[in-house]
Amino acid sequence: MLLIDALQFSKPSRERFEEWRAGNLSAVHVTTAIWENSTETMREIGRWHRLFEEHSDIISPARTVADIEDAAASGRTAVILGFQNSTPFESDLDLVGAFREAGVRIAQLTYNTQNSAGAGCWEDDNAGLSRTYGKNLIKEMNDVGMMVDVSHCNERTILETFEASEKPVAITHANPIDVVGMDVELPFRNKSTQVLKEMAVQGGVIGLSMYPRIAPKGEDCTIDDFIDMIKWTVDLVGIEHVAFGSDFYMGHADEEILWWRQGRWSRSSMVPVSGFVEFPEWFDSSRGYPLMLERMAQAGFAEREVAAIAGGNWSRIFAQNFGS
């Protein structure tokens, strides 16, 4: 059985890689850019290539689903390089294929704000997917084999992306807003029932997240609360459209986290967010995954259902987008 976490953004280190192995993770999608331009992003990709060499006993790069399967069979964790924004493309379609050649397989269209491709979740729904660059970017990603991610987009951009993409679109890390409600720090990061239903029709997958700012009951979310959310989402969209995307992060300094919140375009965070937030005790690192799968089975999920949510669903749409 494959176990895939479709979004983590921890500072890369041997300690984190060992946690992946302790959690039996077959693959992790990691972030190489948020606000960075093409040159800055290539430096980060180069850093990851060096890490693959230095820690080749426990991690390896993933360019295809076969790479994930091979890594799992050899007792390693495959690393899928991705972006949480489309800024590294610099509105230049030629850079999409160039970054794919460098190993990038997943890219979000936006990170919270408006950009050339579309509108992020901090914007209102007056703006959506760009009819010019946004639609052409999606087509280029479809053509070269890079999966489109809409985790931080606003509702209109997401729905218009579903219409524009010929391949399944991912929500790598978010939760259903109708389960979580509005009494968490970042409720606008979560997705409506309409979005989830349209996602399923389009063939996509949502990675449910343990991140306390978007999880049921926030920092008080229990493992049972999380499993109840899995059940609710499965009942809504079907077992084949639900997976994991923890949004787990660790090891970053406060100034780096502030950079995620405001980039260069603001003097302060555009939304009120408290300081560093602790993940729940039952998921204080990737070591929490075996317990999660065990508790899912105890909650009544069949073995094939656990396997689908754990990694089978990501494996399917990865193959559809960037190759088997």
Image: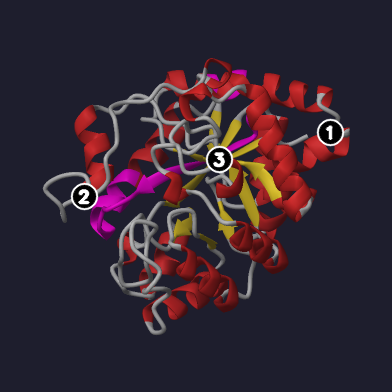
Asked which secondary structure carries label 2, the reply is loop
The residue stretch that appears in magenta: 19-44
Closer to viewer: mark 2 or mark 1: 1
> What's the amino acid at mark 3?
Val
Give the mark count: 3
Q: Position of residue 235 (x, y in %)?
A: 78, 48
- Residue 26 lies, with reference to residue 205, above or below; the image says above
Residue farthest along the bottom direction in this orientation: 132
Tell me the residue at 72%/67% (across/down). Answer: 201
- Quadrant (top left, top right, bottom left, bottom right) of the N terminus: top right
* Label 2 vs 1, first from the N-terminus: 2
- Residue 221 lies, with reference to residue 106, above or below; the image says above
Tell me the residue at 52%/74% (across/down). Answer: 160
> What's the amino acid at mark 2?
Gly
> What label does residue 265 carry, if any?
none
Residue tagged by mark 1?
A: 301
Q: Position of residue 226 (x, y in %)?
A: 64, 31
- Quadrant (top left, top right, bottom left, bottom right) of the C terminus: bottom right
Question: Visible in this render: residue 233?
Answer: yes
Residue tagged by mark 2?
A: 263
Asked which secondary structure carries label 1, the reply is loop
Residue tagged by mark 3?
A: 180
- The image quarter containing residue 222 is top right
Please check the rendered image and state whether residue 305 is part of the magenta-colored stretch, yes or no.
no
